[in-house]
Image: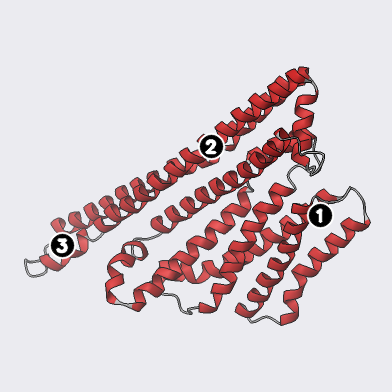
Amino acid sequence: MTLHWPARLALILYLVLLALMAFNLSIVLELPLWSAAAPPVLAAAALAGTWLTAGRRSALFACLLALGSIGLLAVALVLAVPAWQVIADGASRSWAGRMLPMFAAALALHACNLWVSAAAAGEHEERVERLARLIYGPGIIASLLTALILCASLVLGMEWLARSGADAQAITRRFLERGIIPPLTVLLFFWGMLLLLGKWWNGWYLRRALARWSAGLTLLRPSPFTAGLDALTANAADLAEGLQMLWRRHEESWLLPRYLSWAVPVLGFIGTVLGISLAAEGIRRIIASDAGLASLSSDLDGAIAPLGIAFDTTLIALSLSVVLTLALALVQRGEERLLATLERRAREAAREA
């Protein structure tokens, strides 16, 4: 069997992005340019092996997604090192503006990763299982690595913004000078948003297949998902079991996004408790000391400084939580409506069969 044309286009774009990202990594890390050819050569070898061996498409998709995850991990580590320097030391020892092309290539690779995952969902599984695999959502590891890339890039971007002018420092210091909790909060926020973006994309993909299947275009333009819908309605006795599996996968897929929407504000409250605790400890030391009134002002200023951690971390976390919770509610409502429409049309087709 040949690949469906969206999968072919996604694979070609995937190979191009792997080559671009490998080239940018070799420049940033000052590696020999020949090392940039390794990922696309491996991907091309996997593609050639798949064409020579019929029925091995699942191995091709697994190889490409693994190479993409390794590439995202490499970019995340390269960006995380200077970002951690900013968090720990206040400034990175080497500003790498040349990382911008690598950052753009990594984001494009993640977007193509969603496309490849959707186009190849369940190639090696049963037809109904393909629909359930699509509903389950994007890869967790790839989304986490991309979220780390976004978080590290945000830290580096804020460092550049702080250097560009004094007016921006009032904003950036609330994020850069409050310890590890604000970056960790932003990391979980980006992770949740990327998971929701992937679920929205998979829902759009399934909605498109459902529209084609309902319009009777499956013979002209067949796809694995329209075949899955045919298998779902082929036997009325198995219809209820298939629909139950789809709803069960839907519920399971929302466990992690819901946890992230809960964890983001909780991190803000942890920052609040930490800041108040540090401030209380500083005030306790002032009360217990024998310092005179001359040093009281400076000592008190240092003691209450951790209150900035308490208030700013809560402000950042609650603001991000509002956005993440709203996006979660909208995407979840859209997916539930899609599944309800799929169930209704499947039952109608089963009755007509």
The reply to whether the C-beta atoms of the residues labelled 3 and 1 are less than 8 Å apart is no
- The residue type indicated by label 2 comes to Gly
Q: Nearer the viewer, mark 1 or mark 2?
A: 2
Q: Is residue 17 above or below residue 252?
A: below
Specify whether 174 is left or right of 73. left
Say above or below: 252 vs 322: above
Upstream in sequence: badge 2 or badge 3: 3
**Residue 320's disc number:** none
Q: Which mark is residue 60?
A: 1
Between discs 3 and 1, the one toward the N terminus: 1
Please give the residue where the numbered disc 2 appears in the rendered image: 334
* Image quadrant in which the C terminus is located: top right
Q: The residue tagged with tag 3: helix, strand or loop?
A: helix
Q: CA distance from mark 1 to mark 2?
A: 32 Å
> Can you tell which quarter of the image residue 294 is in?
bottom left
In percent of width and height, residue 144 lies at: 57, 53
Nearest the eye: 52 or 265: 52
- Identify the secondary structure beneath mark 2: helix
Residue at 28% x, 76% y is: 166
Pick whichever of labels 1 and 2 is earlier in the sequence. 1
Q: CA distance from mark 3 to mark 1?
A: 63 Å
Mark 3 — residue? Answer: 300
Displayed quadrant of residue 326 = top left
Residue occupying the point 23% across, 61% down: 305
Amino acid type, label 1: Leu
Q: Is residue 241 visible?
A: no
**Looking at the image, which is closer to me, 278 or 308?**
308
The nearer-to-camera label among 3 and 1 is: 1
As rendered, which of 16 and 71 lies closer to the eye?
16
Residue at 20% of width from left, 58% of height from top? Answer: 304
How far is mark 2 from mark 3, CA to CA?
A: 53 Å
